[in-house]
Image (spheres, rainbow, N blue to C red):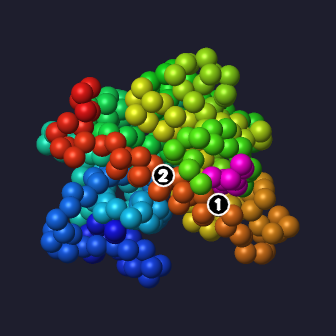
Amino acid sequence: MPIKIPAKLPAYAVLTREGVSVLDEDLAARQDIRPLRIGLLNLMPKKIQTETQFARLIGATPLQIELSLIRMSEHQTRNTAAAHMESFYRPFTEIAESDEKFDGLIITGAPIEHLEFGDVTYWDELRQVFDWTQSHVHSTLGVCWGGMAMINYFHGVQKHLLEAKAFGCFRHRNMAPASPFLNGFSDDCVIPVSRWTEMRQTEIDAAGGLSTLLHSDEVGPCLVEDPAHRALYIFNHLEYDSDTLKQEYDRDVAEGTPINVPCNYYPGDDPSRAPQNRWRSHAHLLYGNWINQIYQSTPFDMDKIGLASA
């Protein structure tokens, strides 16, 4: 079944052209089924690009998904038109005040790795979001900085600055083949990485209650399960488009920012050649497995989400 998004959202036209099944609100209202409510707290500056990437993945499942776009209440973006934000995004304060509940929530990354968590302008509100997930969200997926922030808040695990940016496509080992989140995964897979910080496996192990599902010998832990908080943390970017790393590389080169060619991305590491996407199938597997686990375990009565007895 399709993902339910507004027909005027830019992602609607993009996904329709790609063959992804999408459904506008009028058609969805005629179907006698409860869609899964998935929220996307989008902290990235390029809102449209990011919302399209995640809608593509969760819209490929055989379930009806209702996607809600959420923003931080006070933080303003200068990279996305105000009209787009006004039309499609709701501030978190409005979501919280209306006491809405969600089957799933994705918290994206943000290009603020150099800052201490407490120095982020919206950190106080983001901590409220984390607390709110425990009573109003059935399953939360924190991505890159969003995952680092969540694992720090709930477990005190620190992020550490790298001497050089981890940038490119790295092989990751499947550490938990029996995990339902890795159903269909190969023994290893390639995942795009783009970050200046890392989480350390020793500190994750010391925190207790956490399980690392995907790990790279080169760039460390990637996917961590936190059952106590009904959360997954993924520090890398399976959601990336084929050319996302290229866009980042070209931007840095144009601005004169020192940057290495993303490793194992261009054929022969030659930026003049078109990059190859070697992670798309595993991206669909992970997000499809996440949606499937939500579908199998979330209460039909949404009022019961977050309750201990649910």
Name the residue located 62 percent from the left edge and 22 percent from the top edge: 205
Residue 33 on image: x %, y %: 20, 61
Vertical relation: 76 (above or below) 82: above
Image-quadrant location for residue 133: top left
Residue at image mark 2: 289
Q: From where the camera sits, is residue 206 visible?
A: yes
Residue 129 on image: x %, y %: 32, 35
Front residue of 268 and 185: 185
Name the residue at the bottom extreme.
Answer: 17
Vertical relation: 21 (above or below) 65: below
Q: Amino acid at mark 1?
A: Trp
Residue 126 on image: x %, y %: 36, 35
Name the residue located 74 percent from the left edge and 57 percent from the top edge: 262
As measured in the structure, the alpha-carbon distance from the residue carrying label 1 to the one carrying label 2 is 15 Å
Give the left or right position of residue 234, taking residue 75 as reference.
right
Residue at image mark 1: 279
Image-quadrant location for residue 97: top left
Q: Is residue 190 magenta?
A: yes
- Stretch in magenta: 185-192
Front residue of 174 and 49: 174
Image-quadrant location for residue 206: top right
Name the residue located 56 percent from the left edge and 50 percent from the top edge: 183
Give the left or right position of residue 98, taking residue 150 as reference.
left
SS at circle 2: helix
